[in-house]
């Protein structure tokens, strides 16, 4: 046994002791799971420093929906029972053991670290206690994301089925609740990964090179919420800089049809001064913002928004809190007449990494909210103003931190095969859900429906639909390879040296991927040998030198018309060692000061 494995086992034993203490505490009014004392993280190949903060009582406790906040909610993260059974098998009895939600079964932090596979289902079970003051309200059960097909039962009654691995979904479970002190939730999840045609991103059953370990089951927060029969179901916020206003549309439950919506915006610099407007559900409410304070990476200012629903008798039946940023993204010409990507009507060169969103200990799930935030903070410190979120959709809190800290996001749609009509129909459903779930985030400025021809089809139709459905964002028709001449940008990939497509009259020129410079750092890799990079280097100094040279090559391309560039990538991922940081986020692999200075200098090349 090598010293690294021995040290990992000692760390896991200590983590188990912390988990034992935390497991003795009941949280958020939910019942304690009897297996709490048995949990500890599995012995994974590599752990982050945040792993020691993970326990059954401290598993993503933060409010999961920052743009629609209510006070009455219960977090159901923590220990659940789990079982892996053949796909056709009935509900198991007994279950196999405990799993820490919201970490996928394949991850070390779940405590399971087992493959499920397309021939099996992953079963979950837990109980909870309904608060007494919820009895006269409706109870909503929320899943932020479960990969991929989910069937849910409450107290033995099936309450719903959902297919989709990246989008939040909700079931009203009120009618399935009983008078008993403990209520039971059970679910069965099936995920074929790359044996199916559904959107899955870079998950494969046999990981290698740029393809990674799959995620099965719950991988984002599970929670409960109490609402009145008449309540707000969703909010759509559109900043309109040209009209000096923000447009707000509230979609309510059926019982909310006759209700009035009151919107209240806090004005910056005047704590007690507020702007108010009223309207009805499903009606666009225009709120004047006479002197808007603009949102940008350099100044990510967010307005607070409070929405109140009042019924015909004048009773306030629902209140949610939200936020928005006043920003505009468009194409415009610079002084030389070249099409550029513009933020708030000013050309802005955009630079940042391809971001895979994988973690060595949690796979699709970051170990903590602080870890989720850390990658964004580090990119800002390194002088980046953008990232391309690559074929994965993150939890809503990720985009909250991008909004809050000021990082622009190009959002990819996770790829699938899209060979059959059923695959294509599912892809389009999940594409719309992605837009709906993240419609209000000012940080997201571009949708990318296809990457490098993976599952690409009917590109012109997809782009046309996206532009109609969300006209105030840009659309990248296809990042790399299969450009169809539509959308707002022409995107090329080039490894390792940068290049730029020709300038066009109606689109901006962007470099969607370049770089891929690899350096395995001993003690911080997924495996000790046979790591992979587009190009591999042996020293930090040589890696830094080559990176700086690539950026120097890019400067004339920017002056000639390049509007944005995406470096591969934020971190190493499994055997792929192309990251600015190691996979465990323990270090920046290059000279951080030199990288920061070079990154920031790119913005001057456009001016």
Image (cartoon, rainbow, N blue to C red):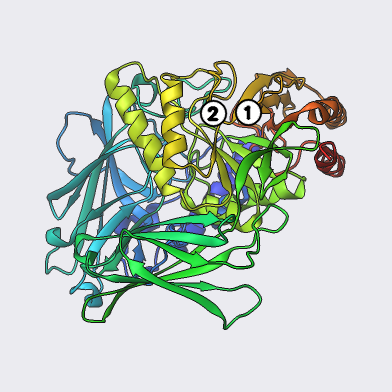
Is residue 42 something that shows in the picture? Answer: yes
Q: Residue at image x 59%, y 63%?
A: 302
Mark linked to residue 467: none
Label 1: how many residues lie within 10 Å, few (<14), some (14-19) or many (20+)?
many
Above/below status of 502 relative to 111: above
Of 393 and 301, nearer the camera is 301
- Determine whether, in the image, residue 425 is placed left or right of residue 101: left
Do residues under tags 1 and 2 come within 8 Å of each other at their CB atoms?
Answer: yes
- Indicate the quadrant containing the C terminus: top left, top right, bottom left or bottom right: top right
**x%, y% of residue 356?**
57, 35
Is residue 113 something that shows in the picture? Answer: no
Disc 1, SS: loop
**x%, y% of residue 390?**
55, 33
Disc 2, SS: loop
Of 488 and 129, nearer the camera is 488
Above/below status of 312 relative to 213: below
In space, the residues marked 1 and 2 are separated at their CA atoms by 7 Å
Residue identified by numbered label 1: 507
Q: Residue at image x 43%, y 38%?
A: 468
**x%, y% of residue 271?**
60, 80
Q: Residue at image x 39%, y 34%?
A: 114
Answer with mark 1 or mark 2, whichever residue precedes in sequence.
Answer: 2
Above/below status of 509 relative to 287: above
- Determine whether, in the image, residue 483 is placed left or right of residue 21: right
Of 229 and 128, nearer the camera is 229
Above/below status of 536 relative to 163: above
Q: Residue at image x 35%, y 27%?
A: 198
Residue identified by numbered label 2: 487
């Amino acid at each position: 046994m090598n010293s690294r494995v021995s040290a990992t086992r000692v760390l896991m034993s200590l983590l188990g002791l912390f988990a034992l203490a935390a497991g003795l505490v009941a949280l958020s009014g939910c019942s304690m799971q009897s297996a709490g004392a048995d949990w500890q993280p599995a012995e994974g190949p590599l752990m982050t420093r945040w792993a020691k903060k993970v326990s059954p009582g401290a598993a993503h406790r933060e409010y999961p929906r920052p743009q629609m906040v209510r006070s009455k909610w219960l977090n159901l993260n923590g220990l659940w029972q789990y079982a892996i059974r053949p796909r056709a098998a009935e509900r198991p009895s007994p279950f196999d053991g405990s799993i820490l939600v919201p970490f996928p079964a394949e991850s070390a932090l779940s405590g399971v670290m087992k493959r499920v596979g397309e021939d099996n289902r992953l079963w979950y079970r837990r109980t909870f206690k309904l608060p007494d003051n919820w009895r006269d309200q409706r109870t909503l059960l929320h899943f932020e994301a479960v990969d991929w097909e989910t069937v849910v039962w409450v107290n033995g009654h099936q309450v719903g089925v959902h297919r989709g691995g990246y989008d939040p979904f909700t079931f009203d479970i009120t009618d399935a609740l009983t008078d008993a002190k403990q209520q039971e939730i059970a679910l069965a999840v099936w995920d074929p990964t790359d044996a199916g045609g559904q959107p899955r991103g870079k998950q494969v059953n046999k990981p290698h090179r740029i393809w990674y370990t799959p995620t099965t089951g719950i991988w984002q927060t599970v929670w409960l919420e109490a609402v009145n029969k008449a309540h707000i179901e969703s909010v759509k916020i559109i900043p309109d800089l040209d009209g000096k206003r923000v447009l707000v549309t509230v979609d309510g439950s059926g019982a909310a049809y006759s209700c009035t919506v009151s919107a209240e915006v806090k004005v910056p610099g005047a704590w007690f001064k507020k702007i108010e407007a009223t309207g009805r559900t499903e009606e666009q409410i225009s709120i004047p913002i006479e002197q808007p304070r603009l949102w940008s990476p350099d100044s990510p200012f967010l307005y607070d928004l409070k929405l109140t629903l009042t019924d015909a008798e004048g009773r306030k039946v629902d209140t949610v809190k939200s936020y928005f940023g006043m920003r505009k993204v468009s194409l415009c010409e610079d002084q030389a007449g070249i099409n550029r990507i513009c933020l708030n009507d000013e050309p802005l060169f955009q630079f940042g990494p391809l971001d895979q969103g994988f973690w060595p200990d949690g796979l699709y799930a970051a170990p903590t909210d602080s870890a989720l935030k850390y990658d964004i903070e580090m990119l800002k410190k390194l002088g980046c103003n953008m990232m391309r979120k690559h074929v994965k959709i993150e939890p809503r809190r990720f985009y909250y931190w991008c909004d809050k800290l000021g990082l622009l996001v190009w959002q990819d749609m996770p790829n699938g095969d899209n060979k059959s009509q059923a695959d294509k129909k599912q892809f389009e459903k999940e594409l719309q859900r992605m837009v709906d779930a993240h419609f209000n985030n000012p940080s997201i400025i571009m949708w990318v429906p296809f990457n490098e021809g993976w599952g690409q089809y009917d590109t012109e139709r997809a782009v046309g639909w996206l532009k109609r459905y969300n006209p105030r964002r840009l659309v990248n028709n296809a990042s790399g390879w299969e450009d169809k001449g539509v959308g707002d940008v022409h995107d090329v990939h080039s490894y390792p040296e940068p290049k730029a497509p020709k300038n066009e009259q109606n689109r901006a020129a962007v470099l969607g991927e370049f770089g891929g410079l690899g350096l395995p750092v001993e003690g911080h890799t997924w495996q000790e040998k046979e790591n992979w990079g587009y190009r591999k280097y042996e020293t930090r100094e040589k890696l830094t030198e080559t990176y700086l040279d690539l950026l120097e090559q890019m400067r004339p391309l920017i002056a000639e018309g390049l509007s944005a560039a995406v470096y591969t990538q934020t971190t190493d991922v499994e055997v792929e060692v192309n990251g600015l940081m190691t996979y465990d986020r323990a270090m920046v692999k290059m000279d951080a000061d030199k990288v920061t200075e070079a990154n920031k200098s790119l913005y001057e090349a456009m001016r």
